[in-house]
Amino acid sequence: MSISLQTDVRMVKGVGPQRAELLAKRGIFTLEDLLNYLPFRYEDRIHFSKIKDVQPNGTYTLRARVMSGQAVRGMYGRDAIYHLLVQDDSGSLPCKFFHGGYLEGRLKPGQQLILHGKVEIDKLRPARREMINPQIEVLTGEEVDSVEMGRIVPIYEAVGTFGTRPIRRAIYATLQNLDSNIPDVLPPALLQQLHYPSRRDALIHTHFPDAGESLEALNLFRSPAQQRLIFEEFFLYQLSLALGRRAVRKENALAFRVREDKVREALKRILPFKPTNAQKRVLAEIATDLEKPVPMNRLLQGDVGSGKTIVALQAAVIAIENACQAALMAPTEILAVQHFLSARRILAPGGYTVELLISGLKPSEKTAARERIRSGEAQLVIGTHALIEEDVEFNRLGFVAIDEQHRFGVLQRKRLMDKAARHGNAPHVLVLTATPIPRTLSLTLYGDLEVSVLDELPPGRTPIETRTTTEQHLPGVWEFLRREVAAGHQGYVVYPVIEESKLELKAAIEEYERLSKAVFPKLKLGLLHGRLSSQEKEDVMQKFRHNEIQILVATTVVEVGVDVPNATVMIIEHAERFGLAQLHQLRGRIGRGAQPSHCILVAPGRMSEDARARLETMVRTTDGFEIAETDLQLRGPGEFFGTRQSGQLGFHVANPLRDRELLELARKEAFALAEQPAQKEALQRVLRLLPGEWQRRYHLARVG
């Protein structure tokens, strides 16, 4: 039976309705989707190792039979360790599975297994070797199966109860019956130039490599077939960015007057301090963009405390001096209020009107604010998602700044842009982020933006000293905080959850009560968390800013948008539970004045290797870019930006971190295709051949 790429996945032998439901949860509906579900590693089942030959610290693939298996449970019946003994014709080998209770009753004596894992020395019996947490596959029968044995075998991540073996068989059946008409969307000249195989051949050899392929290259995703598919993913994604940038450049924007004396004087008048060289350079880059009649689309990266806000306010003043409104959208009310207070303090002496619009305002306050925005009386409008509500109408919006934009969805940002476009001109856009982004991911997430970097902190900032400690030493930590408060300073104590939970973590509300009564009875403590109303949050923050609260007990709600120069201590309990980016942002709440500041990370003595690496990084450096690189290494690109709400990092095989060279090559070729007039016909061919699902995935408009 000949089938096509758009055939429903239920038509594949071995799938059926139940497994199709599991696949649908992974976005796999058609055969094309199934073929894009690629192996994450490969095993050599042509040459199996013998048990007698395995050595400590080596990784091996074995074919052996089950001798015995038993789950040994710890105290209270938790954390079962499953002990398995396997044997081949050369000897026997014990295997150990931590959290292996799920294997109890599943493995029976005599069953044939494929095992793949690392062999280590048994710490209790140094003369004995054991395989730790191997990946296993149960074989049925003794026959040599052409899909399972005698070849390099692909290993797939299980989809629920749909395991690697049935997935492998389903994909094999699909490739056997698929007709030869798999469209090759890459331009033929480009395929020839890069010596890449066709898409059909690339899929076949990625799923079922030839016996002569290098296993090492396959597991490093460096085979020619894999490289072709990686390049294709990057190419189509970068093409969407290139076409987006081209579309923006075709729009009209107001060309602002920047070099007039009136504007220059206004910019000097609002500066609360002497700008750094980095701030001067970045403002010049922004000003050059604002002078052009095409919309600015620029990313401003700057570490915590580098002065991004003042640069954004200067750009807003340029817009206001050109008879336009400016807007600044922040992801949280606390951050929006912080920006509002800073902007009002800096801009009020210049006679500028700053408006705040957040959901937490009273209905009457919202109505009045919307009217001032509509009339143009509000020159700079600062708010949250409330800015993009239907009944918010600007008079003449010319400049938009979006803070921590990766927290917003694509459509949310577009709705703010559209509010300016209603008046005939697209706005100039400045995207701000305090999350330092390595160049590789900057090309991926912000490939359609020009990039400016604030790589210099304002003078007078004292480096923050960071150290780790354990809960047993908390009495000494509290004494240190008490001394800092006695010296006139303030501090934060941060917890991972608001209330007690099954996770056995300390919670902010309970700890606030305990600290107030038992640890700091003579000091003034405050509590801040996400369940407080907007007014309650602002009341607490105002008291903390005015030193009416000496110690602020909080959750990560203080991660961004809190600027209290008098705060010199940040204590984070259960620090092992926080991500590097969160820890870096929390630490950034201190060190904002001239006094020495201290960040104390409280964590257990025993923790995961990743958690230990995070804390060691925090102690070693305060450099945001170094921290971002480590974070990227630990979490991978998909997790680096939190949830996948932007829909921009859902690559099947490409990895921006691992495949940086291919990313840069794909970007170069994609932008050339989109922007060179001579490539118009080749571009139209790519878009015409692109399946509808890919059109939606890469946000590419269908052509003719």
Image (cartoon, grey):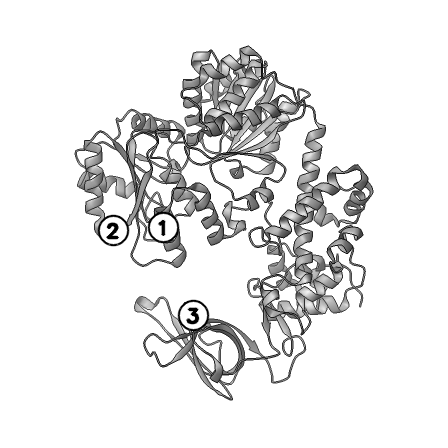
Residue found 79% across the figure and 41% down from its top: 679
Task: Please give the label number shown on residue 471.
Answer: 2
Q: Give the mark toward the camera: 3 or 1.
A: 1
Asked whether 574 or 213 is in front, the reply is 213
* Residue 684 sits in quarter: top right
From the image, tell me which residue sits under label 1: 615
Structural crowding at the residue carrying mark 2, measured as other residues with C-alpha within 10 Å and reported as few (<14), some (14–19) or many (≥20)? some
Secondary structure at badge 3 equals loop
Residue found 80% across the figure and 53% down from its top: 188
Q: Where is residue 375 in the image (x, y as percent from the top left)?
A: 57, 13
- Residue 66 visible in rendering: no
Q: Are marks 3 and 2 in contact (CB under 8 Å)?
A: no
* 668 lies left or right of 493: right
> Label 3 to label 1, Cα distance in Å?
29 Å
Q: Position of residue 551 (x, y in %)?
A: 26, 34
Task: Please give the label number shown on residue 100.
Answer: 3
Asked whether 124 or 622 is in front, the reply is 622
